[in-house]
Image (cartoon, rainbow, N blue to C red):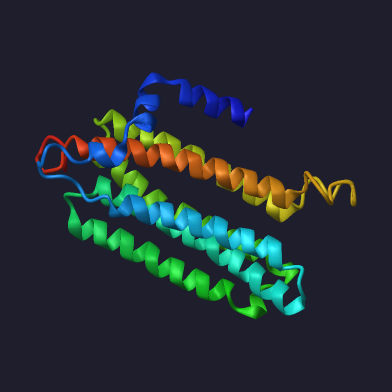
Amino acid sequence: MLIYLFIYLFQDSHLRHILVQPIIHELRDDGAKTIPIWPWFVFLAGGMGCLASSTLSHLLACHSKPFNLFFWRLDYAGISLMIVCSFYAPIYYVFYCNPYIRTFYLTSISVLGVLAIITLLAPSLSSRHLRPYRASLFLCMGFSGVIPAVHTLATHYDHPHVVVALGYELLMAILYTTGAVFYVTRIPERWKPGAFDIAGHSHQIFHVFVVLGALAHTLATLLVMEFRQGSPTCNTQHCQ
């Protein structure tokens, strides 16, 4: 069902235009003042860092018990990194004309992310019985974006790009939450132990939802970038 939803979204002519256009080139308009694109690369770096740490963890965690403990902690830290980096582009571009608010939001999520990574890398917190705690930590980090999202809606409710982007962010939250539920409840392998050891177990389903959530966030970020691309300077029409 989710796959069909994303196919439908990609078929939309407006979104297809956003995805196909060379975004970096479009952000430079014949030498005119442009918006910075480093927040976009922060998001990409965070996503790639998360997937890289996950790949290493699944590849090397079976080496030995010390490797197992270290690389699974690294996997959780990578997820935290992606969550933090995902905040940068939307917050930076939406609050481009409000540097104090922008700095406050970005500093808050960065501090929360650093604390989460330190916590997740602690060996004492890597045990199996703390899985609900780790999942709750990820959800708290993700849902910390509710405040800037409400702020965005209150100040940019008349901008279609921003409103649609918030819809994709809501979809991202639903996808991440669904994945976390599978991760914590160990469905479906708890219903039939041994039947999903190779394929179809909860951890694989969790990763599928993480990737789908990242895709939804990518669509939201591109929409916000296009919104800000049309107003690289601050004025009362585009910034409040």
Quadrant, the N terminus = top right
Identify the residue at horizontal 36%, vertical 45% (top origin).
149
Q: Quadrant of residue 114?
A: bottom left
Front residue (pair 72, 87): 72
Q: Residue 96 location in percent, x, y?
A: 20, 49
Identify the residue at horizontal 18%, vertical 41% (top origin).
28
Identify the residue at horizontal 39%, vertical 32% (top origin).
19
Relative placement, left or right, of 211 versus 181 is left
Front residue (pair 14, 93): 14
Q: Is residue 156 visible?
A: no
Does residue 239 lie above or below 21 as drawn? below
Q: Residue 159 location in percent, x, y?
A: 25, 31
Does residue 198 lie above or below 15 as drawn? below
Q: Residue 228 location in percent, x, y?
A: 22, 40
Front residue (pair 12, 144): 12
Relative placement, left or right, of 89 versus 185 is left
